[in-house]
Image (tube, rainbow, N blue to C red):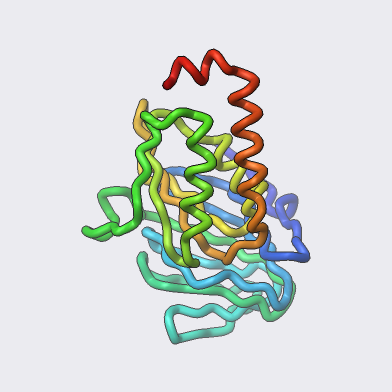
Amino acid sequence: MEKHNLNDLVEFNPNRFNPKVVINEPGYRMVLISILAGQSISEHTTPGTVTIYVTRGRIRFFEGEASCDVNAGEVVTIARGAKHSVQALEDSVIFVLATGGKESDKAPLDESEELDLRNVPRPQRHPMIFAKFDALLPGASLRLLNDHDPIPLSHQFNTLRPGEALWEYMERSAGNFRIRITRIAPANKPDALLSISAEARTASNAHPNRSKARK
C-alpha cells in the first residue's frame, strides 16, 4: 500500500511548469504538475490513454487543432497517441494519469531511435543520451535498452533538464529495461551537457582501472 499527500508535491517554478512523478510503472504513470499562468507544456504524444484532472486553477487544453478550457474540478481525457499540449490561464495544479502504453499496446511502428546501452562504456553513456535528447524536437522521443534500471540518469534529467523530458518505462524486468524519453518542452539550459561531460570525466579519472577494464 502506498499513500501520497499531493498537496506536499505542489511547487511552482517561475521558469517553467514543474512535474512531480507520483507513480512510474510500466503501463501506469501518475504525475502532479504545478504550472503558473502563462506557462505551457509543448505539444507531444504519449503511448497510453491520458486523463488530466485540474485540481486548482484553469488551463486551456489542446488536442491537435481543437481546444477547450478546463477548470478546477473538471477532467479531460484523450486517446493514446493523440498530440496534445497545455497552456495555463491561471496558476494551476493538474493531476495527470497515463495508462496503457506497454510494449504490447504501442502502435505497430515506432520510429524513435533505440540506444542499446549494454555494451557502451559507462563514462560514455550519459553524455551520449543527453546529446541525442538535446537534438530532439518537442514531441519526438528516443528509447533506451539497458540491463539495469538507470535511476541516476532519471535524476539527472530532473536536475539538468527540468520539465523537458517525459520518462516512461516500456519494459522493466530482470536484466531488461526499456525506457522511452520524450521531449515535451524546448531546451532551457543548452550548456547543461557540459556538466554531464565534466561529471563523466571526473568519474573516469576517479576510477581509471575500471575504465580500462571495460575497453
Report the residue at 37% width, 43% height from top: 115
Relative image position of residue 194 (x, y in whole percent): 64, 46
Which residue is at a point 54% across and 46% down the rendered structure image?
A: 23
Q: Left of 124 or right of it: where is 174?
A: left
Say if 137 sits above or below 193 in the image: below
Picture quadrant of residue 155: top right
On screen, residue 151 above or below 161: above
Which image quadrant: the C terminus? top left
Please provide percent x and percent y for residue 3: 62, 42
- Taking the view exactly as shown, the residue that stands out farthest to the right is 14
4 or 129: nearer the viewer: 129
Residue 18 is drawn in which quadrant? bottom right
Image position, residue 95 (x, y; %):
59, 61
Where 68 sits versus 179, above or below? below
Task: Give whichever of 135, 28 is nearer the camera.
Answer: 135
Residue drawn 61% across and 69% down? 54
191 relative to 75 in the view: left or right: right
- Is residue 47 found left or right of 95 in the rendered image? left
Count of marks placed on residues: 0
| Residue nearest the observer in this picture, 41 or 121 | 121
Specify whether 129 is left or right of 207: left
Image quarter of residue 140: bottom left
Q: Quadrant of the N terminus?
A: top right
Q: In the rendering, at what x and y percent does residue 71 appear?
A: 63, 78
Which residue corresponds to the image point at 37% horizontal and 30% vertical from the top-left? 118
